[in-house]
């Protein structure tokens, strides 16, 4: 995964971040602008990530909510295809 | 009698960190880092910031080394911001709401945006009153005449939920004057969607901060003194570093003295190592050995002075080295307004530390140990402990914590202490009773006294493991923790027990084990507890000694706390003149030091409220009562003391129903807390006194019995009891009750006002037809009252006092003018009471029904038959109505009921 320091010129990259444990919908506001999908004991957070500071902010939030991080990858697909498993 | 309070001496805050709320605020955190003269001008970013600060929030969010701080510092000192800039550099130590907001306030006040008399200068956040602080901050901001830019740098270090929640509230309620700039390495967990949608959020991100090719050319040329690279090379460098500021600066340093810059650039561009790794190696390898060693050895501390650098390197030229480093290549930046402290760029410091660990791992521990010793010798305890921990010098760290724990806890720095305790290996903490105790202290400060209380008994069991010297210190720490815990729980008796223990141990352990700070705070805490527990004489000694210790040690806040408590002590002892002098003095100090809404100010407000009450200036009295409520709310004894005062104020305004309601509420709110005995008795007696005034007396004998069962009667209590006995028509009992106290005998207790005692005695003697004794007592009462400006007691005594004054006028010739003044005031007060009828108690539904018949011409018999009830029932209801309306007949009842809109 190549994380550019400043990817503004190229537009946001869609990331798919998966954590262990299903997050209740009430936490959706913690991930402004992202889509949350749960299933199979996992939560996938999918959406456009504009830069490193944004990505680190998201990862911190996942940690704050006690979710164990499994993976985080840039994806090519649109944010809508957020099903898990 | 105590020595009169001339102006309490006080010290001006010195150059050192300002002591505010017992916390040392570091001035360096409130100043932007100095910007290098060789700063590249970047107008496009200034424009972004200018546009952003037209609105509420500007988020500068980008990784380390992207130039956030540098940009904001140079923008702050430009002429471009829309108002004065308040700067605050945050760090992990600010994860404590009280400390965080104290810094925010200090930054705002220092910015020049807050006028000398601005409300923000009187604010003081504190652990107990977080909820009430933010609305005050918001309203203080709203009254500013210019916008103010508040820059919070390094916000990523703030992880505490309470602080973040406070920021969220501030964002939600911020007035238009506030322009917030948050600089952070990653997006903060604050809801910003709403601001974004409403266009009140501007962002400066990594893509904006990235140097463009022309900017990169400027930067490289600036640091080289002359352009050395071709345009293509600059473009190559810019592309390889992606405009990353730190990367470009490191590249510039690497280029220094390169024989073939072009070759360097192409090599760098073709390398796949991380930029920082590659360039740090390049930069460090090119430095002379001496400088390289200096960099590696000094990088372990956050902030450097020449002296500290010498301690770490063993050299003697730290000062000039640092100045040279700042001038020559920007390895370090100067911080603060004085040119003596420096800091490595955070990213560079990280890389240096990594390099140090890789290259000389065996040195790391020794360097931290030296730093710890340097900080400890300068009293910078928290830094010392932190480095001792990093040196993994567990016993040394534990010893520092135990030695300075008491003052850290008492100064309100226990949150930090708790964080530090958690660094230690768990088994060590569990095995060491002192550290276990600090763990308990940490719980107390985090507002979890229950957890601490269950934790505490475990620690003493291990105390026998300690050496004799440490055992004493442990006992002292335990006593202090117990004192703080009891204070927080409002258990004043326990404060007295544990506090006296702490004081005794402090004398034994000696100055080595405890500093003046801890002693002054213990004295003022124990003094305050004694005051509220009604042990006024002992409390006075403690508070006076506390004042002396604080004075000697230059502890402003502790001086102020003692001053304020002493004012209240004299007020509740009935020494109104003294109370006024100390109280006024305390209020002046508070205004000067911006402590007006601090918890420590509350006692002086309550004292002044009582003074004005007795002087019959009810407006001023209410104003001070409100101030006492605003600053002291939430601590139960103060809440109860205030309720008693408010009830008396309502009584003075003729609102007896209201005053009984106030006390009933105070009673109800006591759940889960037992007031100390004399405070409880004060409440009970005030309630009885008010009921008697409202015409619903309780049996006095029962009250007296209840009092005597729980301890000897005090003077203040005897006065109220005698008044009740008079109302019962038993003047002989009243005179007997008062007798022992009239000449200042017996315990004084709460609110023993001598003039009041003599007045009650005069009324009793008169009723007993002992006219000589009545005249003598009245004369004593009048002369004392005139001397102290006391009026209220005469007015409250109502018609009997009026009649007494009128009938004895001829026998007390020395006091005519004051007597006439009182007579007139009393008559006016009586008119006011008649003019504004009050409902003493709510009417029942049946009474309401009967009330509706009263204006009619129907007799009670006719009403009874109309309602299908007996005549007696109607009469009972009618008399109930009369009593509750405070009237004696049907016609008066109708008039009062109409005025109260009951009809």
Image (spheres, rainbow, N blue to C red):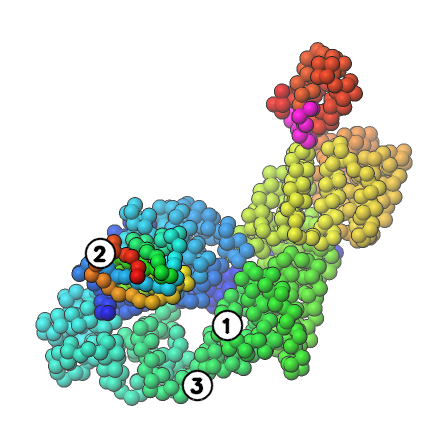
Quadrant (top left, top right, bottom left, bottom right) of the C terminus of chain B: top right
Q: Which residues are magenta?
A: B834-847
Query: Which residue bears the numbered disc 3?
Result: B366
As drawn, the label of residue B422 is 1
Helix, strand or loop at mark 1: loop
Badge 3: chain ID: B
Q: Is residue A76 left or right of residue B845?
A: left
Give B383 or B84, whichever is nearer the viewer: B383
Q: Is residue B809 part of the magenta span, yes or no?
A: no
Residue at (66, 23) in percent of width and height = B848
Mark 2 or mark 1, whichever is nearer to me: 2
Please rate how many residues cluster around mark 2, counting C-alpha atoms within 10 Å: few if below 14, some from 14 to 19, many from 20: few
Helix, strand or loop at mark 2: loop
Tell if the residue under mark 2 belongs to the same chain as the one under mark 3: no
Residue at (79, 31) in percent of width and height = B800
Q: Is residue B102 left or right of residue A69?
A: right
Query: Which residue bears the numbered disc 2?
Result: A78
Badge 2: chain ID: A
Mark 2 or mark 3, whichever is nearer to me: 2
Q: Give x and y (percent) for residue B360.
A: 36, 87
Residue at (55, 48) in percent of width and height = B630
Residue at (37, 64) in percent of width and height = A20
Disc nearer the start of the sequence (1/3): 3
């Amino acid at each position: 995964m190549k994380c550019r320091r400043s990817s503004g010129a190229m537009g946001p990259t869609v990331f798919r971040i998966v954590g262990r444990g299903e997050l209740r919908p009430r936490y959706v506001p913690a991930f402004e602008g992202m889509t949350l999908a749960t299933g199979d004991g996992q939560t996938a957070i999918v959406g456009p990530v504009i830069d490193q500071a944004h990505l680190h902010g998201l990862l911190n939030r996942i940690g704050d909510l006690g979710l164990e991080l499994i993976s985080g990858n840039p994806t090519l697909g649109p944010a809508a295809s957020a099903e898990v498993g | 009698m105590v020595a009169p309070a001339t102006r309490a001496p006080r010290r001006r805050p010195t150059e050192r960190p300002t002591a505010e709320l017992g916390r040392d605020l570091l001035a360096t955190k409130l100043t932007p880092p100095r910007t290098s003269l060789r700063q590249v001008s970047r107008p496009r970013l200034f424009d972004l910031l200018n546009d952003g600060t037209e609105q509420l929030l500007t988020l500068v969010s980008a990784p380390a080394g992207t130039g956030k701080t540098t940009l904001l510092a140079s923008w702050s000192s430009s002429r471009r911001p829309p108002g004065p800039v308040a700067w605050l550099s945050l760090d992990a130590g600010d994860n404590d709401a009280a400390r965080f907001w104290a810094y925010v306030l200090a930054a705002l006040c220092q910015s020049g945006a807050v006028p000398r008399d601005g409300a923000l200068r009187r604010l003081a956040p504190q652990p107990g009153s977080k909820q009430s602080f933010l609305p005050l901050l918001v309203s203080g901001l709203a009254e500013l005449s210019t916008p103010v830019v508040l820059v919070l740098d390094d916000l990523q270090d703030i992880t505490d939920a309470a602080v973040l929640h406070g920021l969220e509230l501030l964002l939600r309620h911020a007035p238009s004057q506030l322009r917030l700039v948050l600089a952070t390495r990653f997006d903060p967990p604050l809801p910003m969607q709403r601001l974004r949608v409403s266009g009140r959020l501007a962002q400066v991100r990594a893509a904006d901060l990235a140097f463009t090719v022309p900017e990169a050319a400027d930067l490289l040329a600036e640091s080289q003194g002359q352009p050395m690279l071709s345009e293509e090379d600059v473009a190559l460098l810019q592309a390889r570093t992606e405009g990353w500021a730190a990367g470009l600066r490191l590249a510039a340093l690497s280029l220094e003295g390169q024989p073939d810059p072009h070759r360097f650039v192409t090599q760098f561009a073709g390398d796949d190592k991380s930029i920082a790794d590659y360039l740090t190696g390049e930069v460090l390898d090119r430095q002379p050995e001496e400088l390289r060693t200096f960099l590696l050895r000094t990088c372990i501390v956050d902030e450097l002075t020449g002296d500290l650098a010498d301690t770490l390197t063993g050299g003697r030229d730290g000062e000039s080295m640092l100045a040279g480093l700042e001038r020559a290549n920007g390895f370090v930046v100067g911080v603060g307004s004085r040119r003596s402290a420096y800091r490595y760029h955070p990213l560079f410091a990280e890389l240096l530390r990594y390099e140090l660990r890789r290259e000389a791992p065996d040195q790391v521990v020794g360097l931290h140990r030296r730093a710890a010793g340097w900080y400890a010798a300068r009293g910078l305890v928290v830094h010392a402990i932190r480095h001792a921990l990093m040196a993994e010098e567990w016993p040394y760290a534990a010893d520092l914590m135990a030695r300075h724990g008491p003052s850290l806890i008492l100064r309100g720095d226990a949150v930090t202490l708790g964080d530090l305790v958690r660094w230690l290996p768990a088994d060590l903490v569990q095995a060491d009773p002192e550290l276990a105790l600090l763990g308990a202290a940490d719980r107390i400060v985090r507002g979890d006294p229950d957890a601490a209380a269950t934790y505490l008994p475990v620690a003493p069991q291990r105390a026998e493991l300690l050496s004799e010297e440490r055992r004493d210190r442990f006992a002292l720490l335990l006593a202090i923790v117990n004192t703080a815990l009891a204070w927080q729980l409002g258990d004043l008796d326990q404060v007295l027990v544990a506090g006296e223990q702490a004081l005794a141990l402090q004398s034994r352990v000696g100055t080595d084990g405890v500093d003046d700070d801890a002693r002054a705070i213990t004295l003022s805490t124990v003094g305050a507890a004694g005051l509220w527990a009604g042990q006024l004489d002992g409390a006075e000694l403690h508070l006076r000694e506390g004042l002396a210790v604080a004075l000697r040690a230059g502890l402003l806040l502790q001086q102020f706390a003692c001053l304020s408590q002493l004012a209240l002590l004299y007020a509740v002892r009935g020494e109104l003149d003294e109370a006024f002098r100390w109280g006024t003095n305390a209020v002046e100090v508070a205004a000067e030091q911006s402590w007006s809404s601090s918890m420590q100010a509350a006692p002086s407000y309550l004292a002044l409220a009582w003074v004005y009450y007795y002087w019959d200036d009810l407006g001023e009295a209410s104003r001070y009562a409100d101030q006492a409520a605003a600053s002291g709310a939430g601590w139960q004894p103060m809440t109860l003391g205030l309720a008693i005062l408010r009830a008396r104020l309502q009584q003075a305004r003729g609102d007896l129903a209201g005053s009984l309601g106030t006390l009933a509420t105070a009673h109800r709110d006591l759940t889960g807390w037992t007031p100390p005995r004399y405070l409880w008795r004060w409440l009970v007696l005030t309630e009885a006194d008010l009921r008697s005034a409202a015409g619903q007396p309780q049996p006095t004998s029962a009250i007296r019995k209840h009092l005597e069962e729980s301890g000897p009667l005090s003077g203040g209590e005897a006065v109220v009891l005698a008044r009740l006995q008079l109302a019962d028509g038993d003047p002989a009992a009243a005179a007997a009750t008062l007798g022992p106290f009239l000449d200042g005998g017996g315990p004084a207790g709460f609110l023993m006002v001598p003039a009041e005692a003599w007045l009650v005695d005069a009324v009793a003697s008169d009723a007993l037809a002992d006219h000589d004794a009545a005249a003598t007592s009245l004369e004593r009462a009048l002369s004392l009252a005139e001397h102290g400006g006391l009026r209220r007691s005469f007015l409250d005594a109502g018609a009997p006092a009026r009649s007494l004054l009128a009938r004895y006028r001829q026998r007390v010739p020395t006091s005519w003018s004051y007597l006439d003044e009182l007579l007139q005031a009393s008559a006016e007060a009586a008119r006011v009471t008649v003019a504004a009828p009050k409902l003493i108690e709510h009417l029942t539904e049946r009474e309401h029904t009967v009330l509706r018949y009263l204006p009619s011409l129907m007799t009670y018999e006719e009403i009874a038959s109309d309602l299908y009830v007996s005549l007696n029932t109607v009469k009972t209801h009618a008399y109930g109505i009369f009593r509750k309306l405070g009237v004696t007949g049907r016609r008066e009842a109708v008039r009062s009921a109409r005025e109260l809109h009951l009809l």
